[in-house]
Image (cartoon, rainbow, N blue to C red):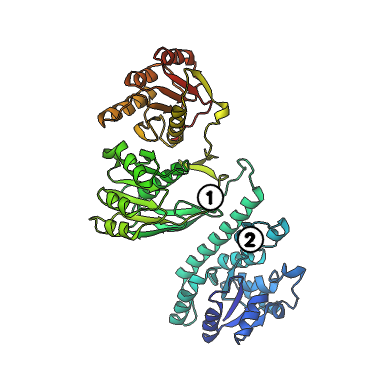
Amino acid sequence: MRALLSVHDKDGLVPFARGLADLGFELVASGGTATALADARLPVIPVEDVTEFPEMLGGRVKTLHPRIHAGILARRSEPEDTRTLEQHGIALFDLVCVNLYPFELVAGRLGMTDDDVVEMIDVGGPSLLRAAAKNFADVAAVCRPEDYDAVLAELRERKGVVSPETRRRLAATAFATTAAYESVIVDWFQGDEELPETFVPTFDKVLDLAYGENPHQRAAYYAERGRRTHVLSRAEQLAGKPLSFNNVNDLSMARLLMREFDHPACVIVKHANPCGVAIADTIEEAYSRALAADPVSAYGGVVVLNQPVTAALGEALAGQFVELLFAPGYDEQAMEALAAKKGSVRILNDTERRALVETERDFKRVLGGMLVQDRDWDLPDRARMKVVCGEITKEQWLDLSFACRVVKHVASNAIVLARRGQTIGIGAGQMSRVDAVRIAVEKAQELGHSIEGAVLASDAFFPFADGPELALEAGVSAIIQPGGSKRDAEVIDAVSAAGAAMVFTNRRQFRH
C-alpha cells in the first residue's frame, strides 16, 4: 500500500502519516511535507525520488509527472492499465492526502501584489485531488485534516482498505474543495467586473438550522466564501434554542437596517419586515420607543440593538416575548434576568467589528436560476433631492431622513410614518400604494400614536393623489418620495393644498 502526501496546512499531518505507516503504507511526500515527516522520524520517500526529476520553477512543478498521476489514475479493473504501469515501472497509490495553498487568505491581505497572490494559485494540489477523486473506485482522496481520524479508524477496522462508500464521500469533498477554491480565484480575477458572463459564488455551511420556513422543511445556513463578514460572523449564541431559517432571515434584514444608524438604535423585525424602529439618546429609550411603535407586531420578533444590553434593558426585555436578541454585549445582570425568563430567548452576542463589504452582490433564487444585482446600500443624495412644495423645517428633515432609511428595508409597496426618530405606522408588501398608506395610518391610530406633524416616506412614487390625501387628512405634515409619476403635478397640488411639504428624492428603493 502506498500513500502520497502533499499538504500546505500541516495540522494533524504527523499523527495521520504515522497511523498510515503503522498500517504498512509506504509514504511518498513532496517538498515541505517530506521535510516535516522526516523531522518526525517517519520513513518517507521524496517525490523527486519517484519522478527522478527535481522540483523546478521555484516549486511550481513538483508532482506534475506521469509517475505520479499514472500511479493515481490507473484502474485496478483494467488489465491494460496494469500492463502499462509494469512496462514503465510505476507503482500504484491507494491514498492521496492533499490540501491547497491558502489563496483566499493571501488574496484578502492588504498590500499584496498580483505576483504575491498569483503564487498562491495551487496547480499541482488540485490536479492530484481531481485525479484521486476521479479514480475513487480505487483511491481515497483526503483533503481535510478533520477527516484524518475517521479515515484512519476505517483503515484499521478494514485492514488497510477504505470502504467504497467512504471513498465516494471523500471524492465529493475533494471536488467540492477544488471547485470552491477556484471560484475564489475567479472572484479575484474578476474583481469588480459588472455582472460577469459566468457567476460562480461558493457557499460553505456555517450552521444546520432547526428547520426551514416551516417545520417540515430541512434547512442550513451557508456563508459565501471570500466575504469578510456575514450575518452570523463573530456572533456567539449565549442562550436559547437552535436558530431557525426565519430567525436568520429576520436577523439579516434587521442588521442591514441597523447599518443605517449611528445613534443608539433598536430595530424589531417580524416576518422579514421592521415593525418597530427607533433612535434615542440611550439604548434603553431606543428599545422602549421601538417596542411602543407596534407592540402587538413585536410579539415574538427579532430584536437588534447597536449598543450593549444594560441591566435595566435586560429587565425590560425579559418582560417581553422575544424570539431572538442580537446585541454587542450583555451586562451580567441582564443575562440573569433573561435566563430566568420561561421559554429562553435566543441570545446572540455580536463581536463583529469589521465593516460590511459594500461591493457584494445581492441575489435571489428563482425557478431554475438566480437573479443577481448590486445591493442597494445607498440612501438618496440630499443634493439630488428637490423640495417640490412647502418648506421643510430642521426637525422635519431629521424625521424624513429617518423614515427614508427605514422605508428602503420594508417590503414594497412600502410606506413608513415616523415622528421624532420613531416609526409610528408601517404599511408593507401591499399590491397598491394607497392600501399601504391606509394600513400605516390605521396602525398608528389604533396604537394611539399622534400623526399630527408626522412625516411619511414612500419607497416609490405615488401614481395618484389618493395615497397622500389619506395621510394628509390624518395629520402628516411632510412627505418624501422618489417622484416620477405621470401625475406628479396632481400629487403636488394635493400636498400643497393641505399646507404640507413634499420632497422628491429621484431614487426608487423597492425591496421585494
Residue 254 in picture, x, y percent from top left: 41, 44
Helix, strand or loop at mark 1: loop
Density class for disc 1 (Cα within 10 Å; few <14, some 14-19, many ≥20) is: few
Query: Residue at label 1?
Result: 355
Amino acid tagged 1: Ala
Side of 315 where 370 appears, left or right: right
Q: Which of marks 2 and 1 is nearer the N terminus?
A: 2
Residue 46 in picture, x, y percent from top left: 68, 80
Q: Do the residues labelled 2 and 1 touch (CB within 8 Å)?
A: no
Density class for disc 2 (Cα within 10 Å; few <14, some 14-19, many ≥20) is: some
Q: Which of 35 and 143 is in front in this view?
A: 35
Q: Which mark is residue 106?
A: 2
When asked about the image quadrant of residue 382, the answer is: top right
Residue 443 visible to an observer of this rendering: yes
When asked about the image quadrant of residue 11, the answer is: bottom right
Q: Residue 249 carries which label?
A: none
Helix, strand or loop at mark 2: helix
Measured along the vertical axis of the image, is residue 139 above or below residue 259?
A: below
Measured along the vertical axis of the image, is residue 292 above or below residue 502?
A: below
Amino acid tagged 2: Val
Residue 329 in picture, x, y percent from top left: 40, 56
Side of 167 where 193 appears, left or right: right
Residue at the image position 56 percent from the left and 83 percent from the top: 25
